[in-house]
Image: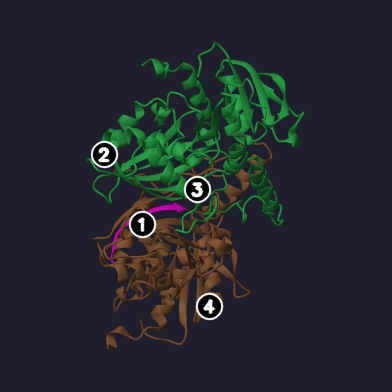
Chain colours: A brown, B green
Amino acid sequence: MVKKEKYNVAVAGATGAVGRKMLEILAERNFPIANLKVLASAKSVGQALSFNGCDVRVEELCENSFEGVDIALFSAGADVSRQFAPLAVKFGCIVIDNSSAFRMEPDIPLIVPDVNPEAIGAKPGIIANPNCSTIQMVVALKPIHDNYEIKRVVVSTYQSVSGSGQKAIDELQNQTENLLAGGQPESNVYPHQIAFNCLPHIDKFLENGYTKEEMKMVHETRKILGDSSILVSPTTVRVPVFYCHSESVNVETVKPINARDVKQLLSAVEGIKVFDNPESNEYPLAIDCADKDEVFVGRVRDDISCENAINFWVVSDNLRKGAALNAVQIAEYLTTRRDPDKH
Amino acid sequence: MVKKEKYNVAVAGATGAVGRKMLEILAERNFPIANLKVLASAKSVGQALSFNGCDVRVEELCENSFEGVDIALFSAGADVSRQFAPLAVKFGCIVIDNSSAFRMEPDIPLIVPDVNPEAIGAKPGIIANPNCSTIQMVVALKPIHDNYEIKRVVVSTYQSVSGSGQKAIDELQNQTENLLAGGQPESNVYPHQIAFNCLPHIDKFLENGYTKEEMKMVHETRKILGDSSILVSPTTVRVPVFYCHSESVNVETVKPINARDVKQLLSAVEGIKVFDNPESNEYPLAIDCADKDEVFVGRVRDDISCENAINFWVVSDNLRKGAALNAVQIAEYLTTRRDPDKH
């Protein structure tokens, strides 16, 4: 990408929960924007979205939307990405795509800027943003893998409804109100009631009994950490929480590992906050991590069931670090990195 | 215990969430009761509790409460059990204790009737009822251990607030109402807000970084399955659910294991219901398992990260099978077993 003082930026899927968060984060981080386009489907055209205190009108996402655009952030679902991202690239635009459409394509970099920015090649076209549940886990796993070589991860997630968009946030709220008033809850977004319940089911079931969400955590972790030997067994569960995903992670390593050293190691990493003082009831909580940029780690302890293993609890805002912030951080990396052609 | 047609039964801690459930289950299962005493602390004396459609007056739990009582079910906390259970035994009463007071005493049997009834000796005094999160897990683990020899279990729990009693049920309800009305939630039972949040903290923290609840799952599992070589690493988490605990369990075995056989194996076990049809979105859910006696298992699948391992999801009513029902089932076993002296 040619370096400029300011960039023409488009956000596709701007009216969704993640799209709005992208606009919010671009503004709050003063991303150098020359011209901003907010794009969505025909039904949202004309709607005004707030950016830096100004109203920006939604335009319809179409074939020519990306003419003159330098960077496009996509968060409108895999189908939209598949249709429009290649068109954007034809106009010379770099697409940072939050959908699952291209993540596992061998030629498409899958990037967490804190973990593997170098995987963005010299001339990127589409750059994939990983799945939210993967991002927060790999941020914590990266220093562990570098120092102790990860062998196997067993992870159970506690994922908030905001990961399924605004409609799911409304569904949790409506169901909860209904139930407290003695009524019958209606389920539209999820196959079952989510209020006061846990659903061990995120995304479609696959032939091996895992869900797509679970297998994303397997494949994306390997791709981002650049090591296909890492074994991962996830169970992904939706819980009645509005914002932030929590994860219970068990990691077995090749080299001897201990909780004390891992706490020290993670404490020194930018983008991670270790919040781990059991004696004063301090550990990361979903309600405390909303609107925070970092990945929060706590309950780090030696696994009493395995020699070279630890357990930890990791929480992060799935709409920010798990989606919008990570995408903006990729854009920031592109605009600030040394030109890879001139190494 | 001398066999009778009907037994004098006492319930100590009868006004609590588990105590009430004990009364309900004794009635619904037609336990052969001659005389029923409901006991609680002085402040509840005179209160009427419902049993089989009749009112029973609460009497104060005191030193002589157990004169003439054959079987006492205790659920009034560890301190009360430590004080009164030995006194009851002196009167020749068999105590089935739901607290943690005696569970790990080498001479006290720790019983899940579906798993290890034989561990009740010929002349039991106190019989301990395991922790709720342990019971539902060991019911599912028992046939797996018998057939495949369990090596290691990694478990993350999703525990409902009813495990902390009626005050916690009220706290979840009040906090939820408050938050939906735009107010500030008040936390008294838990150290942090439980509504729309997950707390990776149940019971006290111990020196090794695990909580007491987590270590209960380690020690009790070994004691109940009668195998101290079984390795367990639990992470216990409180979730904003009223009734039933859910658990994400990963089991590694010594012998080759596969999900298909395990589903068949568990389906044949009384007390277990396998509810596992991902293609029609069927898996056990907390909201469906309330007031059910069984332990529900689903999402059984081969672990892709380990050769001899499977994952499953297990849900059960923590007040019933996890506490009151299990205690009553122990009492039933005592009244129906062949006299062990006459083997």
Residue linked to disc 2: B258
Foreground label between 4 and 2? 2
Mark 2 in CB contact with mark 1 (< 8 angstroms): no
Mark 4 in CB contact with mark 2 (< 8 angstroms): no
Distance between the alpha carbons at the discs numbered 1 and 3: 28 Å
Residue B162 position in % (x across, y down): 59, 40
Foreground label between 2 and 1? 2
Residue linked to disc 4: A29
The residue depicted at 51 percent of the width and 70 percent of the height is A293
> What's the chain of the residue with tag 4?
A
Mark 1 in CB contact with mark 3 (< 8 angstroms): no
Mark 1 in CB contact with mark 4 (< 8 angstroms): no
Count of labels shown? Answer: 4
Foreground label between 4 and 3? 3
The residue depicted at 58 percent of the width and 22 percent of the height is B26
Q: Are marks 4 and 2 on the same chain?
A: no
* Displayed quadrant of residue A105: bottom left
For the record, the magenta segment spans: A149-158
Q: Label the magenta part by its dominant secondary structure.
A: strand
Q: Earlier in the sequence, mark 3 or mark 2?
A: 3
Give B320 or B95, whichever is nearer the viewer: B95
Amino acid bearing label 3:
Glu
